[in-house]
């Protein structure tokens, strides 16, 4: 009778049971750990007068990466396509994924016209200059 009850060694106490974690583990075991591929890693540093954004996009050509700014939102997207040459091979295991990847960032405090982008050795680097704070003009009013 005990073999009919699912037993998880990680569950010691019913109060600590998290059904969402169990569903995530089930999804990972069925589909594999594809969540690491769906988004690319990004570092953002403050350089004083600008932000430096570095994204890891290894294996992409510069032509496959698109940068779009719309409504104070910067979207970095990259697409990897399946080559016709790859279809001819009889793969035993395939870990390199094909598809599109994208991330969006809020650029409301960024001077959009001054954004500079470069791509070298699989790393996309963006320099995002900060908007200059406009101080209200001060003036002295004459009393009449």
Image (tube, helix red, strand yellow):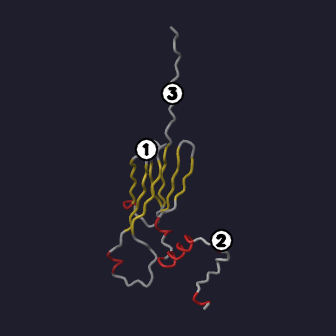
As displayed, is residue 51 above or below residue 33?
Answer: above
**Does 69 appear above or below 36?**
above
Image location of residue 100, percent across then percent down: 39, 65
Image quadrant assignment for residue 98: bottom left
Q: Secondary structure at mark 2?
A: helix
User: Which residue is situated farthest in the front direction here?
Assistant: 1
| Residue tagged 3 | 136
Q: Which residue is mark 1?
A: 112
Q: Position of residue 85 (x, y in %)?
A: 33, 77
Question: Nearer the observer, disc 2 or disc 1?
Answer: 2
Q: CA distance from mark 2 to mark 1?
A: 50 Å
In the image, what residue occupies the spot 52% across and 50% down? 52
Q: Earlier in the sequence, mark 3 or mark 1?
A: 1
* Disc 3 versus disc 1: nearer the observer: 3
Q: Position of residue 30 (x, y in %)?
A: 48, 79
Q: Farthest residue to the top: give it.
A: 144
Q: Which residue is drawn at the image coordinates 42% and 65% (left, top)?
A: 60
* Residue 15 numbered tag: 2
The residue at the point 39 percent across, 52 percent down is 68
The location of residue 139, given as percent across then percent down, is 52, 19
């Amino acid at each position: 009778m005990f073999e009919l009850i699912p037993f998880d060694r990680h569950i010691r106490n019913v109060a600590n049971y998290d059904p969402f974690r169990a569903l995530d583990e089930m999804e990972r075991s069925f589909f594999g750990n594809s969540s690491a591929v769906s988004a690319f890693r990004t570092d953002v540093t403050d350089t004083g007068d600008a932000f430096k954004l570095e994204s890891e996009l290894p294996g992409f050509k510069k032509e496959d990466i698109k940068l779009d700014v719309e409504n104070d939102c910067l979207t970095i997207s990259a697409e990897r396509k399946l080559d016709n040459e790859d279809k001819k091979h009889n793969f035993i295991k395939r870990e390199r994924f094909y598809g599109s990847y994208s991330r969006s960032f809020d650029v409301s405090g960024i001077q959009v016209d001054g954004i500079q982008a470069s791509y070298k050795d699989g790393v996309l680097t963006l320099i995002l200059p900060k908007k200059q704070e406009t101080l209200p003009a001060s003036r002295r009013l004459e009393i009449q």
